[in-house]
Image (tube, rainbow, N blue to C red):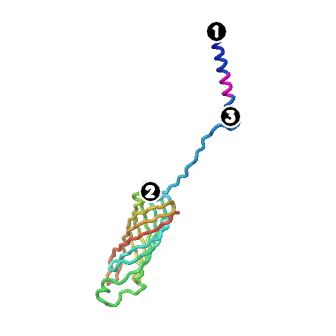
């Protein structure tokens, strides 16, 4: 009796396995198997230093030694060499007022109007010292970088062309993949001989720039 029951159970198990295999094969032929649908997330590198070219237009204040501080406007082109190093080309214009000597003495002007124009260009080497992120809100972050620059160039002022040197620092903020802004301080040095002797002048500049990333 027991052997008969075992035989029945064995036959039932074999039939069940055969039916399951047949159903599985039929689903495979009909394309009924569920396949996972994976969506690839698009990831872009929005960090500062991930683009080859940055074009900036800036405005600010330039303080020329022995003159008052005056407005300055300029353009910058930055070519990213590596994630940290970049080469920066700068050109800008300004116009100075009267010297303190002219104001106090009331004498004849030392410079003509055209000689009061200041034009300079610089070629700087820059370095992104502290690239990072600023958390504006709990769900909003902006890519930032504190940078330093140093370079040489030329300045036209007082009817003369002079060589110039420059050192500076600034902070750049990137709003999205193609637009940002920066604040920069720059120390410019060139020779000047308006008062009968040649001397090195130290001239400070502070600017605010809006940038496009390419």
Q: Earlier in the sequence, mark 2 or mark 3?
A: 3
**Image check: 186 left or right of 5?**
left
Residue depicted at x 64% and y 10% = 3
- Residue reaching furthest to the top: 1
User: From the viewer's perspective, is residue 12 above or below residue 199?
Assistant: above
- Label 2 vs label 1: CA separation? 78 Å
Does residue 131 show up?
Answer: no
Q: Quadrant of residue 6?
A: top right
Residue 176 can be seen in this image: yes
Magenta segment's dominant SS is helix
**Alpha-carbon span between mark 3 and mark 1:** 40 Å
Residue drawn at x 64%, y 17% as measured from the top left: 9
Q: Residue at x 38, y 78 (%)?
A: 70
At mark 1, the secondary structure is loop
Percent coordinates x, y for residue 92 in the rendering: 44, 74
How many numbered dots are placed on residues in this image? 3
Tell me the crowding category of disc 1: few under 14, some 14 to 19, or many 20 or more residues within 10 angstroms, Cα based. few
The magenta stretch is 15-21
Which residue position holds label 3?
A: 27
Q: Is residue 172 left or right of residue 108?
A: right
- Compared to 106, does 42 lie above or below? above
- Circle 2 is placed at which residue position? 141
Write down the residue under mark 1. Answer: 1
Name the secondary structure under disc 2: strand
**Residue 17 falls within the magenta-colored stretch:** yes
């Amino acid at each position: 009796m027991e052997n008969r029951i075992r035989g029945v159970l064995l036959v039932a198990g074999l039939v069940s396995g055969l039916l399951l295999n047949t159903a599985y094969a039929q689903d495979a032929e009909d394309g009924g198997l569920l396949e996972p649908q994976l969506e690839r997330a698009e990831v872009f590198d929005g960090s500062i230093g991930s683009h080859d070219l940055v074009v900036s237009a800036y405005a600010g204040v330039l303080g020329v030694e022995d003159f008052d501080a005056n407005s300055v406007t300029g353009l910058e082109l930055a070519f990213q060499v590596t994630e940290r190093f970049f080469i920066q080309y700068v050109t800008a214009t300004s116009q100075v007022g009267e010297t303190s000597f002219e104001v106090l003495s009331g004498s004849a002007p030392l410079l003509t109007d055209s000689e009061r124009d200041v034009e300079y260009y610089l070629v700087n080497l820059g370095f992104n010292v502290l690239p990072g992120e600023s958390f504006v809100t709990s769900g909003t972050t902006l890519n930032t970088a504190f940078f330093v620059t140093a370079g040489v160039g030329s300045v036209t002022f007082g009817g003369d062309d002079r060589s110039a040197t420059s050192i500076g620092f600034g902070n750049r903020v990137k709003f999205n993949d193609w637009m940002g802004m920066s604040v920069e301080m720059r120390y410019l040095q060139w020779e000047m001989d308006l008062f009968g002797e040649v001397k090195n002048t130290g001239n400070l500049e502070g600017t605010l720039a809006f940038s496009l990333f390419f």
